Amino acid sequence: MVELTPDLLNQIYARHLDWYPAIKNPETPPVHINGVGDVLDQFDLVLLDSYGVLCRGPKPIKGAVEAIKLMRNRQKKFCVVSNDTMTRRAIAAEKYQQRGFDFSAQEVLTSLDMTDVFLESVKNPENYGVIAPLEHPSNHLMQGMVRLNGCNGLIPEQVDNLLFLTGAGWTTEMQSNLVSSGNRKQFQLLVGNPDIGAPNGDKIVATPGYYLANFAEQTQQSNKPELFGKPALNIFQRAMTEHGVTDPERVLMVGDTLYTDILGGNAIGCKTLLLTCGVYLGLDIEEQISQAKISPDYIAKSL
């Protein structure tokens, strides 16, 4: 497990801004509020990040369960939009239920749901190398692909597409082998979970976006990766379409990470709420915003 500091997390994101939608900030400085209840009446749909907003690891964040109940009481539509690439929406909803959230499958959308759409379209699977555990929910869609976890990270000659699906089970030795075997060759890069890191307990741990960035930098890749999760706009658009909302200004995106939740939400035209109970816990949030040059509409300590 690779642990990251918030500063390193931000530095890696900043080095790869060309991978993401262009920064589109609100015209006015962010407003500090107590939580989503303060602005709920302005919106028809609330999109929620998962880790750092609802929970840190397996434990719900204080006040999150109550905030969901508040949205239900006010009959507001909401959807968890997560960069989770280990579970599809139905199974993810069951996991949240175990943590005290009463979500239905239609109230969750994961980047694995988005990645599966791509996997269903793949031709010549033997040309794809995938970073994912050998036991994975999408195994049936990855038949014929090279499972790099089973190759200890070494890329076979026929592979010219690399899918960074999930970091579960991925080791520093595998990453080193990936880099050494990927030198002097350009690949088509794809990533199911673009997050560089995610809060887990009191730590920030590396996620697939970190391993992608590390590989791209060390092997001097020139191709921009295709993203299947936030901040790519397609996952936001799908959530809005499924919930029947066409005006992005009537949508609030709530997240804890400037470079994914807030950047993507701003880019598609949603209003955005940044929570400080996730990756920026205990940090000067104004300084983080100044460094990233990415700004939300609202800031709150928790949901």
Image: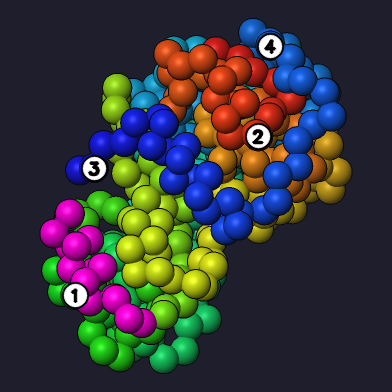
Residue density around tag 2, few if under 14, some if 14–19, many if 20 or more, within 10 Å: some
Q: Which residue: 30% across, 65% down?
A: 131
Q: Nearer the viewer, residue 246 or 219?
A: 219
- Let me know if residue 22 is in the magenta part: no
Q: Nearer the viewer, residue 153 or 248?
A: 153
Q: Are marks 1 and 4 in contact (CB under 8 Å)?
A: no
Q: Secondary structure at mark 1?
A: loop
Residue density around tag 4, few if under 14, some if 14–19, many if 20 or more, within 10 Å: few
Q: Earlier in the sequence, mark 3 or mark 2?
A: 3
The C terminus lies in quadrant: top right
Q: Nearer the viewer, residue 147 or 157?
A: 157
The N terminus lies in quadrant: top left
Dividing the picture into quarters, in which one does residue 245 lie?
top right
Q: Amino acid at mark 2?
A: Ile
Residue density around tag 1, few if under 14, some if 14–19, many if 20 or more, within 10 Å: many
**Majority secondary structure in the magenta region:** helix
Q: Position of residue 201 (x, y in %)?
A: 29, 25
What residue is pinned by disc 2? 294
What residue is pinned by disc 3? 2
Residue range corresponding to the magenta coloring: 172-185
Q: Earlier in the sequence, mark 2 or mark 1?
A: 1
Q: Nearer the viewer, mark 2 or mark 4?
A: 2
Q: Amino acid at mark 1?
A: Leu
Q: Is residue 132 visible?
A: yes
Q: Earlier in the sequence, mark 2 or mark 4?
A: 4
Q: Secondary structure at mark 4?
A: strand
Q: Amino acid at mark 3?
A: Val
Q: Secondary structure at mark 2?
A: loop
Q: Nearer the viewer, residue 256 or 143?
A: 256
Q: Which residue: 29% across, 22% down?
A: 202
What residue is pinned by disc 1? 154
